[in-house]
Amino acid sequence: TATKEESLQTVWTVARTIPAGEQIEPEDVTAMTLPTALVSPEMIAKEEEAVGKHAKVELRPGMPLLASVLYEGNPIAKDVRTQEFQIIQLPSHLGKAQYIDVRINFPTGEDFVVLAKKQVLDREGTVIWLEMNETDLLLTSSAIIDAYLQGARLYAVPYIEPGLQEAATATYPANPMVLDLLEQNPNLVEQVSTELARQQRERLESNLNEMSEADKMRVMYGNVTVQQQLMNERAATQQSNAAQQMPQPLSFPEQDDQESVQGEDEQPPSSLPVVVEEESPEATLPDPPPASEPESETAPDYSEIFNQ
């Protein structure tokens, strides 16, 4: 008998059929014994491991409870999906499992919260994955259209202490067509009141219409223009440095001068050498000195000069 008892193990199952998403109460579970050889490590061996959790799939009596078919927390709504985004500007230090607010900034300076306290399921470069319900999907779709048509910017802001900080309130007013969908969409779990959002949207569109297209372009592309100018200047500097380092070809000034003279006169030079006649020596001799006065006919007395 002892050997037989040692070969059996207690596991837990449900006492009634439990639909997917429903929470398991203490009266919903019951114990059952199975041979130890048939018990897997995933089977629930303690009652407290099953009570209070929700069923991912439909559970029937006689089926041993597995940890993989139960989950903790709020039940997953029917309209929840996983969505991938590439248009949202992400902080460089943003990591997986962090909580963020997705905000939208318009050229007028107005800034709204589109998604509040969303956990980053995964991140790869500039791509993130978020858990979204139907309302989130519609609001984000409207925000993406505003980003293209109105020059708005979608960006993410992470929470500092998500365990202590409450979720922000979504303040973004979607466009009127999306607001109509929010009122009539059958996939929404809860109906959304759009009266205040419509008023905010009218004010936002009025501000956008008062803003000139030139000002919108300055806000949208001002930083891009400055960055492009810096890149162009940097490229020009690199090309100039590279040109200075290359050996320069030898130049012949005389030939360049002759070519410039030819271009000015538009007459080809004569192929015959030019002979320059030298002036005769006679032409270059100095004039003869003036004639001296004629000597006197009487010879001078040199003896007297000699005695002196």
Image (spheres, rainbow, N blue to C red):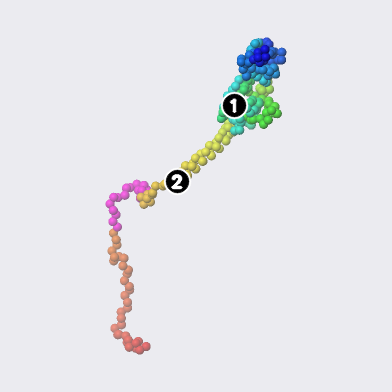
Answer few, some or many: residues within 10 Å of disc 2's Cα (few below 14, many 20 plus, some between 14 and 19).
few
Q: Is residue 272 magenta?
A: yes
Answer few, some or many: residues within 10 Å of disc 1's Cα (few below 14, many 20 plus, some between 14 and 19).
some
Any part of residue 257 in sight = no
- Asked where in the image residue 277 lies, by quadrant, the reply is bottom left
Residue 74 horizontal/vertical position (percent): 67, 20
Residue 155 horizontal/vertical position (percent): 61, 29
Q: Quadrant of the N terminus?
A: top right
Magenta stretch in the rendered image: 257-276
Q: Quadrant of the C terminus?
A: bottom left
Residue 98, label in figure: none
State the residue in front, 223 or 219. Answer: 223
Q: Is residue 146 above or below residue 37?
A: below
State the residue in front, 210 or 198. Answer: 198
Q: Residue at x 30, y 81 (%)?
A: 295
| SS under mark 2 | helix
Amino acid type, label 1: Asp
Any part of residue 121 in sight = yes
- Asked where in the image residue 87 lies, by quadrant, the reply is top right
Q: Residue at x 63, y 26 (%)?
A: 119
Residue 122, label in figure: 1
Measured Cα–Cα span from mark 1 to mark 2 = 49 Å
The residue beneath circle 2 is: 245
Residue 206 horizontal/vertical position (percent): 64, 27
